[in-house]
């Protein structure tokens, strides 16, 4: 299994502050990978490093086996849709397609024109007067028509209304099905990721909290609820991700590859949202200093 | 990439073409009359007959307000155009992409950012130099009669010297050097500051500073100036002008009929021992008749030491200055490439 994005000890500092620090991850080939995490986790920085827009302060990153933006050939293999999908406001839709044709040797003009017609963009319209959803579709069209092997999208749907969001993701999924392109997509909207991703990376404070196939992750995580008890008394092989207790009851999010035995527990499957929130709150609790009782 | 840069540059190119067209029409309409006035004035042959002063003076007086105003507008325009290019073309060239985020679109096409910048800089700098070059050609042609006649005319000043503060940067090839430099300066300000309005302000301020400081501190020394000594005698003292010399002293500046068109950088009065001389120290010049003062001064064997650039050095100075500004533009462009490649601008 080869990795589309592989990072080791990757860090990026702006003056004194670290936007991303000591990040190690590998995103496998042929997936639609969702990168999820709270604001400030370093998602945008990681994706900009992967697109070669930034140079790392330390550590290594390779994209499709090469350093990002190593040359025209590497650039041609990666499509990038930046946050807020910037386009040239005064250039028409047709102008953007011409730009794509000029700057990309593998440009697929038929694909671009087909997509533009499909999403209902007017070729003569200036990009600055497009709606947010249309602009995102134009940016996605540009990225797809260069026929990349990997498509990186940074919060592509964050600013779109629900309908535009669904249309955008549907278009993305159609393109993935048709052209077999690998996708890495960041979002803080878990419901959207759930709809499109088959691989998940939870990133909190530059660290990968969990990464894996969505189906495998969902199969190995469970919510246990039962009478209140000490989590230490659980059978071995169970990793507690998150726990909450009331006076009478304990609720645990656990990870295990084995079946859970114990008649006193009620075992329920978890959703992707439960899983992501569980890992995010665990990471937050680890970073918060524990309260100490002052004598 | 060059096609895209040219496309993105078309608004500026259209503005430049429109301004050029307006100028060309005005100058083409008025030029023939100006040339016929010049031809009938007889200035072309005046040096052989020694009649330059009256002929040139009457020619300049005959020109009238319209032509004089147009002449100065042309000079002012040529001095301003490089600053305008640096401020309005070059400074926003990259900052607009940074502010709108579109650099992320441009830098993730199958073109390296080095080529992206090369195309942007190349197209812009060529357009800047072509614009200024055409303006310079047009105005140099149209102003030719005035430029030739004015230095001979009565009451002229350094303003009309081809080597002077005003004409030198508005004639010949120096405007090309300024255009390239102003363009590179604006792009560099954009790379460093990344925001459009502050980058524009910085470009304008820096360029105007250089435009003012350069002729004061640098241009006189591009070629070591020549020195001439003129004896102050009873014959030329009455026509000499009084001026403020080094250290607040009063000096006599003799008129120099043989030095038409030379750029006089400084004048000093020196005594036979070679020491600087202050005319105010001569008691005969304190409140006496001018004749008494002249008589007293003429016995002192004073000389005026004149530091100057001969008019014949016009083209040498032009080439030096243009070369320096072009080299500075290349250095600034090199910095932009280095910055874009190594620092990888984030926003």
Image (cartoon, rainbow, N blue to C red):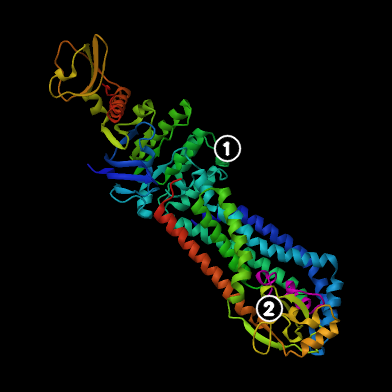
Q: Tell me: A192 left or right of B43.
A: left
* Picture quadrant where residue B13 is located: bottom right
As drawn, A25 above or below B335: above
Which labelled disc corresponds to residue B344?
none
Asked whether, in this view, residue A228 is left or right of residue B142, the answer is left
Residue B284 in sight in this render: yes
Residue B8 higher or lower than A6, as above or below:
below
In the displayed orientation, state which residue is furthest to the left.
Answer: A236
Q: Which residue is mark 2?
A: B263
Q: Secondary structure at mark 2?
A: strand
Q: Nearer the viewer, residue A12 or B42?
A: A12
Residue B78 position in % (x across, y down) = 68, 65
Residue A237 screen position, x and y as percent: 14, 24
- Residue that label 1 marks: A129
Residue A166 included in the magenta stretch of the image? no
- The kind of secondary structure element at disc 1 is helix
Q: Chain of mark 2?
A: B
The residue depicted at 36 percent of the width and 45 percent of the height is A13
State the extent of the magenta-drawn residues as a range: B147-170
The answer to which image quadrant residue B260 occupies is bottom right
């Amino acid at each position: 299994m080869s990795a589309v994005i592989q990072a080791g000890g990757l860090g990026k500092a702006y003056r004194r502050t670290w936007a991303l620090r000591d990040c190690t991850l590998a995103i496998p080939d042929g997936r639609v990978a969702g990168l999820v995490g709270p604001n400030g986790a370093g998602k945008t920085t990681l994706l900009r490093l992967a697109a070669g827009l930034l140079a790392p302060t330390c550590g290594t990153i390779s994209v499709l086996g090469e350093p990002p933006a190593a040359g025209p050939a590497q650039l041609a293999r990666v499509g990038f849709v930046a946050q807020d999908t910037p386009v040239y406001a005064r250039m028409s839709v047709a102008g953007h397609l011409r730009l794509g044709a000029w700057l990309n040797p593998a440009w697929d003009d038929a694909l671009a024109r087909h997509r533009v017609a499909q999403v209902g963009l007017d070729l003569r319209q200036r990009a600055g007067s497009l709606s947010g959803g249309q602009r995102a579709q134009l940016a996605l069209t540009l990225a797809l028509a260069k026929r990349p092997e990997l498509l990186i999208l940074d919060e592509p749907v964050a600013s779109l209304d629900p309908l535009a969001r669904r249309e955008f993701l549907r278009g993305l999924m159609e393109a993935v099905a048709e052209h077999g392109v690998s996708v890495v997509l960041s979002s803080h909207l878990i419901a959207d990721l759930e709809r499109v991703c088959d691989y998940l990376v939870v990133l909190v404070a530059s660290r990968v909290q969990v990464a894996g196939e969505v189906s495998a992750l969902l199969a190995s995580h469970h919510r246990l609820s039962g009478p209140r008890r000490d989590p230490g008394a659980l059978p071995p092989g169970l990793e507690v991700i998150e726990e909450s207790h009331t006076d009478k009851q304990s609720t645990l999010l656990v990870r295990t590859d084995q079946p859970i035995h114990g008649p006193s527990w009620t075992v329920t499957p978890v959703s992707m949202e439960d899983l992501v929130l569980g890992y995010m709150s665990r990471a937050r609790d680890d970073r918060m200093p524990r309260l100490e009782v002052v004598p | 990439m060059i096609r895209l840069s040219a496309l993105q540059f078309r608004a500026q190119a259209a503005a430049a073409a429109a301004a050029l067209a307006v100028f060309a029409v005005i100058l083409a309409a008025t030029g023939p009359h100006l040339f016929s006035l010049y031809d009938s004035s007889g200035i072309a042959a005046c040096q052989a007959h020694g009649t330059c002063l009256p002929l040139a003076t009457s020619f300049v007086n005959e020109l009238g307000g319209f032509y004089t105003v147009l002449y100065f507008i042309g000079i002012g325009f040529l001095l301003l155009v490089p600053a305008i290019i640096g401020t309005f073309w070059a400074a926003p060239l990259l900052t607009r992409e940074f502010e709108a985020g579109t650099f992320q679109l441009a830098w993730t096409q199958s073109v390296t950012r080095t080529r992206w910048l090369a195309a942007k800089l190349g197209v812009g700098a060529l357009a800047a130099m072509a614009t200024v070059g055409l303006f310079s050609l047009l105005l140099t042609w149209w102003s030719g009669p005035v430029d030739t006649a004015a230095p001979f005319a009565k009451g002229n000043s350094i303003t009309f010297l081809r080597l002077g503060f005003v004409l030198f940067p508005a004639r010949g090839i120096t405007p090309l050097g300024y255009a390239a430099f102003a363009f590179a300066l604006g792009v560099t300000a954009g790379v460093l500051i990344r925001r459009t309005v502050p980058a524009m302000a910085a470009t304008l301020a820096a360029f105007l500073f250089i435009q003012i400081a350069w002729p004061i501190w640098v241009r006189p020394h591009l070629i070591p100036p020549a020195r001439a000594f003129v004896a102050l005698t009873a014959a030329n003292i009455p026509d000499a002008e009084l001026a403020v010399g080094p250290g607040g002293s009063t000096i006599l500046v003799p008129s120099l009929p043989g030095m038409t068109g030379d750029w006089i950088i400084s004048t000093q009065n020196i005594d036979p021992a070679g020491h600087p001389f202050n005319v105010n120290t001569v008691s005969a010049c304190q409140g006496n008749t001018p004749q008494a003062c002249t008589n007293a001064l003429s016995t002192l064997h004073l000389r005026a030491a004149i530091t100057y650039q001969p008019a014949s050095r016009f083209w040498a100075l032009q080439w030096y200055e243009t070369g320096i500004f072009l080299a500075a533009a290349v250095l600034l462009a090199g910095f932009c490439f280095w910055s874009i490649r190594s620092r990888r601008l984030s926003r």
